[in-house]
Amino acid sequence: MVNTSIGRSRFFFDWTLLLPVLTLSFLGVLTMSTFGQGMSLAPRQLIWIFLALGVYVTLSNFDMRFLRRTSVVMSMYVVSIILLSLLILFADPVMGARAWFSFGLISFQPADLAKLTLIALLAKYLSRRHVEIGDFRHIIVSGAYAFVLIFLIVIEPDMGNAIIFSSIWLGMMLVSGISKKHLAVLGLIGCIAASALWFGGLKPYQRTRIISFVNPAGDIRGSGYNAYQAKVAVGSGELFGKGIGYGTQSKLRFLPEYQTDFIFAAFAEEWGFVGVVLLLSLYALLFVRLAQIARTAATNFDAFFTLGVLILFAAHVAIHSGISLGLMPVTGTTIPFMSSGGSHLVLEFAALGIVTSLARHGRSAKRDLSANEFPGGYA
């Protein structure tokens, strides 16, 4: 951690985390900016970046070890369930999904809080149970915790976030040391669940998106339009791109939602292949640093929580970029630190602030958690 002193105040930052994410954030602002040629979300995004940075500074300088307590983790879990349930009952649908609470100019997506909650919950559960992960019971119990949140997300319906939640659970189970036999069983269960979703859980427009993913040229003017325009934008960037502010697909609005769901495609059009390599290198630096922090973590909870944050970011990057490249069906997923929006940006900086705080305050702690574990493998 980097110790920065200002007067009598002492502020702790991890610049190896901050520099990549701030660079990514301002690259996002450049991509969504219209440079005076129309309405842009860039000014509002700048405000959110500074607010999110304030959240990072606050949490990184606060002792966040209280998150290791079972009562805190379970309270977060209950609150997340309540908020997601209230969404389904009272929130107005936006683009077909009841995923946001709107308060005038500000919208809040409870799924963002639920992601952090799931990471903390699984970190708490696996912090000692990972040595017993050979017992399939622990896979079932941890999966049940995750399933409740995923089920509420699917009902909204928000398949993009449902995939993210599933990725967090699966990724954290993999790093805990799940056996190949159990992994095969999970794969079979996943296939059965996917079949059930296809025939009974997915909305007609969601099935259409998947069909369009398999054959986007089949309906370019309809369901395949977004995927087709995203691939055109990425391909037209070629080696060095068209230049900042000169992306025709995005700035002329051929590419829908280019400031949020397709900002990777808009960036690739303006910066080209070289820019994409730079972008992915910044994410790689962030992931490597998180892996280093997890490797030297003072407790198992800290290690699992940090790895959970890494998995969350990596899942978003893989899915968002995969959609823009035509490798995955369109699900409306943001990319960390770049996509427009305050709710997810605050969550991302908050997650890094917690990681920084745990690393700072956990140095003197023993590797094993001494208290507040789930008794008997259950919460």
Image (cartoon, grey):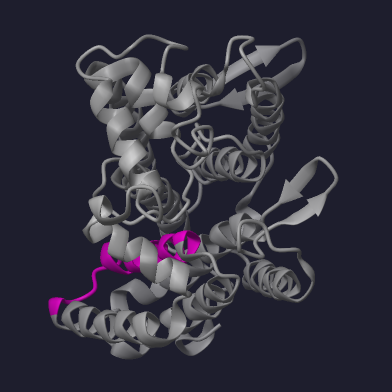
The answer to whether 300 is drawn above or below residue 35 in the figure is below
Find residue 273 and report its horizontal and vertical position in percent: 23, 21
The answer to whether 330 is drawn above or below residue 248 in the figure is below
| Residue at (29, 54) in percent of width and height | 328
Q: Read off the magenta span.
A: 160-180
Residue 54 in view (yes/no) = yes
The C terminus: image quadrant:
bottom right
The answer to whether 161 is drawn above or below residue 47 in the figure is below
Rendered image quadrant of residue 130 = bottom left
Find residue 242 and report its horizontal and vertical position in percent: 33, 12
Rendered image quadrant of residue 148 = bottom right
Q: Is residue 151 magenta?
A: no
Residue 166 in view (yes/no) = no
Nearer-the-camera pick, 143 or 178? 143
| Residue at (14, 76) in percent of width and height | 180
Pick out the residue farthest to the left.
180
